[in-house]
Image (spheres, helix red, strand yellow):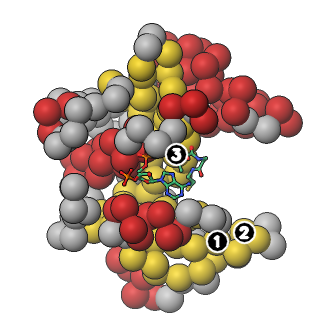
Amino acid sequence: MRGKRQPSLMNSDFPRPSPCRIFSALSSDVDRGFHDLNRDMDPNLVHVFLDKLQRYAAKPDRALLFAEAEGKIIGFATIIDRADAPEGMDKAVVHLLQDYGCGTGLMVLPEFRRRGVARILVQHWGQWAKSCGRQGVWIVTRQMADWYQRYFHYSVLGITVRHGVEKTVLAGDFLNPPVS
Ligand SMILES: CC(C)(COP(=O)(O)OP(=O)(O)OC[C@H]1O[C@@H](n2cnc3c(N)ncnc32)[C@H](O)[C@@H]1OP(=O)(O)O)[C@@H](O)C(=O)NCCC(=O)NCCS
């Protein structure tokens, strides 16, 4: 298995001035990130959140990306090299997703929203997936399908049902990047 990848994080890669620094977190960064981010989590699920941060920071097949501004961690994104396609996808989609990285979490603290932080985190999903040789990134979302389509040119691949809740499966491929 490869070592932990550090994607190129040059802010000059992006057309607008960056409101934050993005870095690929290591295990030693997790406590600080958890401290700054967990107040926006469901109190009953903070242990699940901490476990997720630890796994994504430690394992070489995935990444925990932190956004930092004003000395604080203000947002995060998680991505995994390969994940099983969601239930309900047709064969062609299952086949396609084998070549895509999977974004599994994205959040920006409320007071830092609408400043372009998520946009940069999603761009880093793409950079990280590309560095793994992937063709794109897929995600599952309950409410943000329109947002991914509008701002990132993700396409809807289907609907999956998880724990009785309908969610949309979307993917962005590197041949169809968003217009900045
Ligand atoms: C969704 C979320 C990640 C967006 O973070 P953000 O840093 O505010 O997003 P950005 O500032 O990068 O927004 C990019 C564009 O989307 C727009 N946008 C942001 N949030 C939006 C929303 N909820 N609805 C519609 N448009 C939105 C912004 O105005 C911006 O457009 P612009 O460049 O034309 O101004 C953030 O609101 C969040 O953490 N929500 C809770 C968790 C969540 O929903 N995560 C995604 C689940 S899959």
Q: Most extreme residue toward the right, as rendered?
A: 44
Q: Pointer 2: what residue? A: 162
The one nearer the camera, 101 or 143, is 143
- Name the residue rendered at 68%, 27% in the picture: 38
Q: Which amino acid type is marked by label 2? A: Arg
Quarter containing the N terminus: top left
> Is residue 55 depicted above or below 169 in this figure?
above
Q: Pointer 1: what residue? A: 167
**Residue 63 visible:** no
What secondary structure is found at the residue carrying circle 3?
strand
Q: Pointer 3: what residue? A: 106
Calculate the distance from the C-alpha at mark 3 to the C-alpha at mark 1. 16 Å
The image position of residue 9, as x and y in percent, is: 23, 31
- Label 1 near label 2: C-beta < 8 Å? yes
- Name the residue rendered at 21%, 62% in the picture: 179
What secondary structure is found at the residue carrying circle 2?
strand
| Left or right of residue 46, residue 112 in this image | left
| Left or right of residue 32, residue 170 in this image | left
| Left or right of residue 99, residue 97 in this image | right
The image position of residue 157, as x and y in percent, is: 46, 80
> Is residue 11 depicted above or below 100 in this figure?
above
Q: Which sits earlier in the primary sequence, circle 2 or circle 1? A: 2
Query: Which of label 3 and label 2 is nearer to you?
Result: 3
What secondary structure is found at the residue carrying circle 1?
strand
> Is residue 44 depicted above or below 154 in this figure?
above
Q: How many marks?
A: 3
Q: Which amino acid type is marked by label 3? A: Leu
